[in-house]
Amino acid sequence: MSVLLKNIYKFFISLKLAVIVILSLATISAVGTIVESKYDALTAQKLVYTSIYMYIAMGLLVVNLVFVAVDRMPWKKRHIGFVLAHIGIIILILGSYITQQRGLDGTMIFNIGEKQRWISLPGYTDLIAYSTLDGDSFKLSYSAEVDFMKDPPTLEHPYVFSVDGQEIKAIDFYPYALRESEVTESQQERDGPAL
């Protein structure tokens, strides 16, 4: 084995890497807790818990656990607890990643004795536009799945979509704003329908 590979191997089994990873995870989790207390769980999940920093820290933890377990080979009877603990942590991390990628996270509200078949999903990933001619009846004109929490539109990079042949640009995102809607009639006859 070359000197470089030996050094890499020593680094991956070192206590130094374990301490760096644990401190990184503690710091990221603390930031996530602060963000969650200031905003909400979805914001913390989008901005902190699924960030590249968390993925790197968790990946390094898995690598460290694998290398440390392999370094103890051949395992003896006294290593059973050590190996099972490391395998258990790796399975938990992989399971949480699979759940984060493929799972469904929602809320089901019901009172004691009630039955419920529906869940509410977080609404930060849908952009829906309605149009009206009279201000009373609305029709769905545009619907798309977006993630403005991670990639918000800006004046320089707007989110552009079309409603009834008209181009509309979303240039800002307010995740905690209260929604208000008002339809006003145009004073010019040739304006036609408005959104």
Image: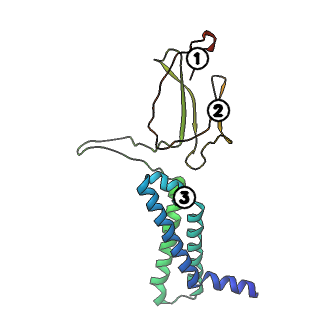
Q: Which amino acid type is marked by label 2?
A: Phe
For marks 3 and 1, the one nearer the N-term is 3
The mark lying in front, picked from 1 and 2, is 1
**Residue 132 drawn at (x, y percent):** 52, 19
Q: Is residue 1 visible?
A: no
Q: Give the percent coordinates (x, y) of residue 113.
A: 23, 44
Residues 131 and 84: in front is: 131
Q: Residue at x 52, y 59 (%)?
A: 48
From the viewer's side, name the closer residue of 59 and 124: 124
Cα–Cα gap, marks 3 and 1? 42 Å
Which residue lies under the disc numbered 3? 50
Q: Which residue is mark 1?
A: 193
Which is more N-terminal, label 2 or label 1? 2
Q: Quadrant of the C terminus?
A: top right
As helix, strand or loop, the secondary structure at mark 2 comes to strand
The residue carrying mark 2 is 161
Residue at x 45% of width, y 50% of height: 105
Q: Amino acid at mark 3?
A: Thr
How far, Cα to Cα, is label 1 from label 2?
17 Å
Considering every residue shown, the one lying at the far top of the view is 189
- Where the N terminus falls, by quadrant? bottom right
Q: In the rendered image, which quarter is residue 190 located in?
A: top right
Does 88 sit left or right of 70 as displayed? left
How many neighbours does mark 2 have within 10 angstroms: few (below 14), some (14-19), or many (20 or more)? some
Q: Is residue 155 left or right of residue 96?
A: right
